[in-house]
Structures are given as structure tokens and as C-alpha cells.
Image: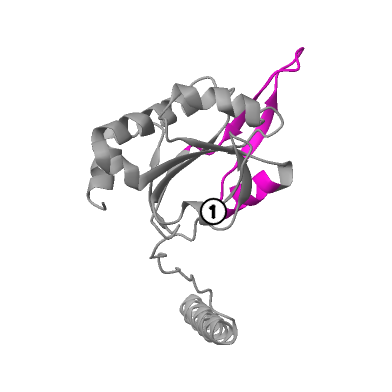
Amino acid sequence: MLRLWFIIALVFIVGVVATINYFSAKQEAKNSTPIVTVISKPQTGTPQLGGHFSLTDQHGVPRTDADFKGKYQLIYFGYAFCPDICPMALSHITQALKILGNKAEQVTPIFITVDPGRDNVEQLAVYVQNFHPSLVALTGTEQQVKQAKQAFKVYSSKVEEKGTTDYLVDHTSIIYLMDRQGKFVTHFNHETTPSVIADTLKSLL
């Protein structure tokens, strides 16, 4: 009999403790600040790329972004000592313009160096001979080139080679298609085929 009363009392005590813990936890949850996960909406619209730049072309003539308005532009940032990626991109631009035929007159291909220390006017004058005859190559001071890179959100970084003064340059490899007002339309990379670039331009011209 005594054992039965002991069991009943123990069950009662456990029940009371459980009830107290329940209401304490509920009150604590009520007073605490809830954790909210905020998921931002995806960004839509056209990226803000492009803008003012002031550089010098392969003939030593000062050029700004305003000089190229009125025509579509294919703009690529690279450097003349680039071993493979830059020549590939510029070759694809050259072939795309050849595919366009006479319509290519409505497009200006532009090469902007990210290595102004080596890519001076004379260097670029030789370099452009490997590509489309209408290609405009631009260089300038470090600050002028920096301004152009910032306008197009281009990254570049010098990579030194041990034991030599030679270096490579890591850089963004994008071909920017700008409209007649200098506004961004779309982009390609250095592996985009000439036919894709040409077809995109045909749909706009």
C-alpha cells in the first residue's frame, strides 16, 4: 500500500515539473526574437556596364567613348602579349565581321589594353595588323585604363614569373556588345563562335 502511494506521488511530481517546463519554454519563445531568413528577389534588367573613357588609339589620336557612338561596338579588354585568349577573341570578332559583309560597316571593333606599361601606341599599331582592318586599339596612362576598366567592371592582375622580368596578366575575357548610344546590349566570351556573334549582330542591324 505504501509503495502504491509512493508511485502515485512520484507520477504527480513528474507531471507538475513537466507542466512548469512547458509553460516556461512557451513564454521564453514568445519573448525571444524570431529568426527570419530574408531571400532577396533576383535582380532583373540590363547590367550597368560601359561609360566614359578617354584613351589614345594606335595612331596616337586621343579617343573617347563619344567618338564611337552612332555605330554598334564590340569591345574587348586584353593585352598584346597575351598568348592565346586575346588572339582567339579578336579572331572571332574578325571572322564575325567578315560574315556580316557590308553590314560590318555599322560595327566598330575596339580593343582596350589592360597592360598600358607595355602596350604603347607603337606596339598596338603592329598588333592590330593581325585582325580586322577596322579594329581600333586603345591605350593610355594607368589611370585612364583603370577608369575604362571600372566602367566595364573589368578585372586584371599582373602575374610575375620567377627569375624573369616577363609577366602575364590575368583578366576578364568578355566581348561587350554596345548599341549605337554606347549602352550595353549583351556579351560573349572568347570561345563564342563567330557565327553566334554575327547572328546576334544581324538581328540588330
Task: State the residue position of label 1.
Answer: 65
Residue 15 in the image: above or below residue 167: below
Residue 162 in the image: above or below residue 183: above
Nearest to the observer: residue 77 or residue 30: 77
Residue 180 picture location, percent across and down: 39, 57
Q: In which quarter of the image is residue 82?
A: top right
Q: Which residue lies furthest to the top in this view?
A: 163
Nearest to the observer: residue 127 or residue 155: 127
Residue 93 picture location, percent across and down: 37, 34
Please check the rendered image and state whether residue 156 is part of the magenta-colored stretch, yes or no. Answer: yes
**Residue 193 visible in the picture:** no
Residue 117 picture location, percent across and down: 72, 31
**Residue extent of the magenta highlight:** 144-173
Nearest to the observer: residue 163 or residue 185: 185
Relative to 141, is 174 on the left or the right?
A: left
**Residue 49 visible in the picture:** yes
Residue 110 in the image: above or below residue 92: below
Q: What residue type is labelled 1?
A: Asp
Residue 85 in the image: above or below residue 42: above
Task: Tell me the element at label 1.
Answer: helix
Nearest to the observer: residue 6 or residue 109: 109
